[in-house]
Amino acid sequence: MQNTVVILGTGGTIAGVAAEGASDLSYQAAQLSIEALVKAVPELRDVPLETEQVDHARPVEHPPAPQG
């Protein structure tokens, strides 16, 4: 019997996106589902997985650092 890996999606920083080549200012946290993140890892293709999106939390927003 083969084990199943369970991956729980919680959103946050790892699920964020930014336009390719864009500055960090275009980054938005918690945009991707756990299914999208798993599909982005080819090594997981043949691993028996169970995924569940349990939350879609956004990280705490911090004001930008002073410039200059």
Image (cartoon, grey):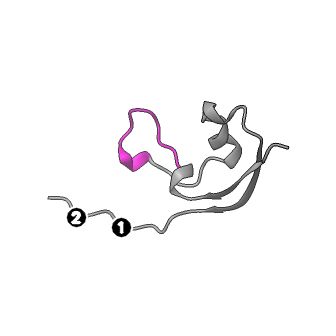
Residue 52 as seen in the image, left or right of residue 37:
right
Q: Main secondary structure of the magenta part?
A: loop
- Which dot marks residue 36? none
Give the structural element (helix, strand or loop) at label 2: loop
Residue 42: x and y in percent read 62, 30
Q: Is residue 55 above or below residue 3?
A: below
* Along the viewing direction, whichever of 47 and 3 lies nearer the viewer: 3
Residue ID at (38%, 33%): 21
The residue carrying mark 2 is: 66
Mark 1 is on which residue type? Pro
Q: CA distance from mark 1 to mark 2?
A: 9 Å
What residue span does the magenta drawing correspond to?
16-26
Residue 52: x and y in percent read 76, 54
Residue 4 as seen in the image, left or right of residue 33:
right
Instruction: Specify the quadrant of the image occupied by residue 53.
Output: bottom right
Mark 2 is on which residue type? Pro
Residue 57 as seen in the image, left or right of residue 47:
left
Instruction: Estimate how packed mark 1 is, as few (under 14), some (14 to 19) or many (20 or more) residues with alpha carbons within 10 Å.
Output: few
Instruction: Specify the quadrant of the image occupied by residue 12.
Output: bottom right
Residue 60: x and y in percent read 48, 69
Residue ID at (62%, 33%): 43
Instruction: Specify the quadrant of the image occupied by residue 20.
Output: top left
Residue ID at (22%, 64%): 66
Residue 35 as seen in the image, left or right of residue 62:
right
The residue carrying mark 1 is: 63
